[in-house]
Amino acid sequence: MFDFQLDNIVAWIRDGGYTSVALQLPEGLKIRATEISDYLTEKTGVETLIVGLPCYGACDLYDYKGKTDALVHFGHSPIPSQGDDPNVLYIESRSDAD
C-alpha cells in the first residue's frame, strides 16, 4: 500500500481555509483517487476535482487556478526551479510494502 499522508493533507486544507482542491495523481495511483477524494471531503468538507489528464511528473502540474483554490500533487517531490506556490502541496507517495 501507499502512504498518501492523508492526515497531513487534511491539516493543510484546514490551515489554508481551502474550499476546493484539485487532486493530481500519476497513472498508477489514479485507481485510489476516489478513495482519497472521499476521505478529504469527509474530514474537511472540501470539494475535490480529480484531474484525469495524464501526469508525467512534478514538472507537469495541472493548472488549477480559476478551477479550485489549491492543488495536491501526488507521487513527486517539488522542483525548486519551478518556484514555490503555497497553494500547491506535493505528496511523495511511497509504498510501505516490504
Image: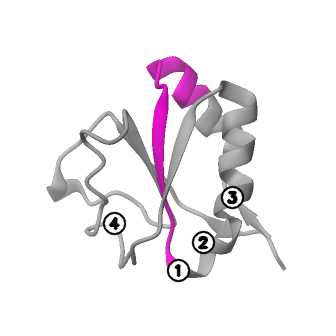
User: Which residue is denoted by mark 3 in the rendering?
Assistant: 34
Q: CA distance from mark 4 to mark 1?
A: 13 Å
For marks 4 and 3, give the one nearer the viewer.
Answer: 3
At 15% from the left edge and 57% from the top edge, which residue is drawn?
Answer: 81
As measured in the structure, the alpha-carbon distance from the residue carrying label 4 to the one carrying label 3 is 21 Å
Report the side of 88 relative to 73 (left or right).
left
Residue at image location 47% in from the left, 34% down from the top = 20
Label 1 secondary element: helix
Q: Position of residue 71 (x, y in %)?
A: 40, 46
Task: Choose between 7 and 32: the one closer to the eye.
Answer: 32
The boundaries of the magenta stretch are 11-26
- Residue 84 drawn above or below residue 97: above
Q: Are marks 2 and 4 in contact (CB under 8 Å)?
A: no
Q: Which residue is mark 4?
A: 58
> Which marked residue is nearer to the observer: mark 4 or mark 1?
1
Q: Earlier in the sequence, mark 1 or mark 3?
A: 1
Marking on residue 30: 2
Category of crowding for the residue at label 1, using alpha-carbon neighbours closer than 10 angstroms: few (below 14), some (14–19), many (at least 20):
few
Circle 2: element type: helix
Circles 2 and 1, Cβ within 8 Å, touching? The answer is: yes
Report the quarter where the N terminus lies: bottom right
Measured along the vertical axis of the image, is residue 96 above or below residue 71? below
The answer to whether the residue labelled 4 contacts the one labelled 1, judged by CB atoms less than 8 Å apart, is no
Q: Position of residue 84 (x, y in %)?
A: 23, 42
Quadrant in which residue 4 is drawn = bottom right
Residue assigned mark 1: 27
Q: Position of residue 19 (x, y in %)?
A: 49, 26
**Foreground disc of the pair 1, 3:** 3
Q: Amino acid at mark 4?
A: Ala
Horizontal side, residue 62 vs residue 83: left or right: right
Amino acid at circle 1? Glu
Where disc 4 sits, the SS reads loop
